[in-house]
Image (cartoon, rainbow, N blue to C red):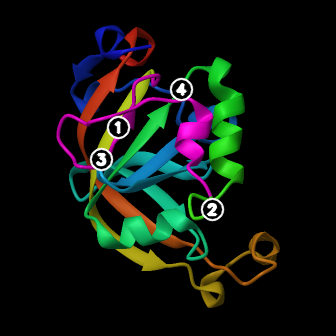
């Protein structure tokens, strides 16, 4: 996939199976800029509307290398890649960018985004560019169901980020 296969669309015209995109396809979350960035594979999050804006909601544990980049910058990208890149996405989700150049090892091609500083990926069939609007830390005292705590054996509670979707590039299947 490359830019000629994607078209810029209004975020309100984005047509996607959101739960499937996170839980089955996964997404690449990237923060930083073209000089210094980190990417991680995510399978938790949401896309919707809040404060009369289209938004993406993602969570990052403080122990992840990407957390530093999310804290330092005001922007991030989400990329959905075709299923044939599952091996590369697994690598990006299982190795730390602290220890190696995992992006180079993956063979994926980072590209400059259209609006935000955080890079995207040329192979993506969907690129969502976001500017942070809000963050908060997950608080275990607020869990209303006891099973939620089972996700936090190490007490490494996520930070939640809500980002305004400021630009979308999508392949034909995502254009509603």
Number of the front mark, 1 or 2: 2
> Which comes before the other along the chain, label 4 or label 3?
3
Look at the image and say whether residue 112 sits in the magenta stretch: yes
Residue 3: where, in percent of width, then height? 31, 16
Separation of residues labelled 4 and 1 (CA atoms): 12 Å
Q: Which element carries disc 2, helix, strand or loop? A: loop
Q: Residue at x 30, y 25 (%)?
A: 169
SS at mark 4 in the image: loop
| Quadrant of the image occupied by residue 31 | bottom left
The quadrant of the rendering that contains the N terminus is top left
Q: Residue furthest left?
A: 115
Spot occupied by residue 174 in the image (x, y as percentages of width and height) = 41, 19
Q: Which residues are magenta?
A: 100-124
Q: Earlier in the sequence, mark 1 or mark 2?
A: 2
Pointer 3: what residue?
34
In this rendering, would 158 be left or right of 149? left
Residue 168, compared with residue 70, is above or below; it is above
Check disc 4 and report the residue beneath it: 81
């Amino acid at each position: 996939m490359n830019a000629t296969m994607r078209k810029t669309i209004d975020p309100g015209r984005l047509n996607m199976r959101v739960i499937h995109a996170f839980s089955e396809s996964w997404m690449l979350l990237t923060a930083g800029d073209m000089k210094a960035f980190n990417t991680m594979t995510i399978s938790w999050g949401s896309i919707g509307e809040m404060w009369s804006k289209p938004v993406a909601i993602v969570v990052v544990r403080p122990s992840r290398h990407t957390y530093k980049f999310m804290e330092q910058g005001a922007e991030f990208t989400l990329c959905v890649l075709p299923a044939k890149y599952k091996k590369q996405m697994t690598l990006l989700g299982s190795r730390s960018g602290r220890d190696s150049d995992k992006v180079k090892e993956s063979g994926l091609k980072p590209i400059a985004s259209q609006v935000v500083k955080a890079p995207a990926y040329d192979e993506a069939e969907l690129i969502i560019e976001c500017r942070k609007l809000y963050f908060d830390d997950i608080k275990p005292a607020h869990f209303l169901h006891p099973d939620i705590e089972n996700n936090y054996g190490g007490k490494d509670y996520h930070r939640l980020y809500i980002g305004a979707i400021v630009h979308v590039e999508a392949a034909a299947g995502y254009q509603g």
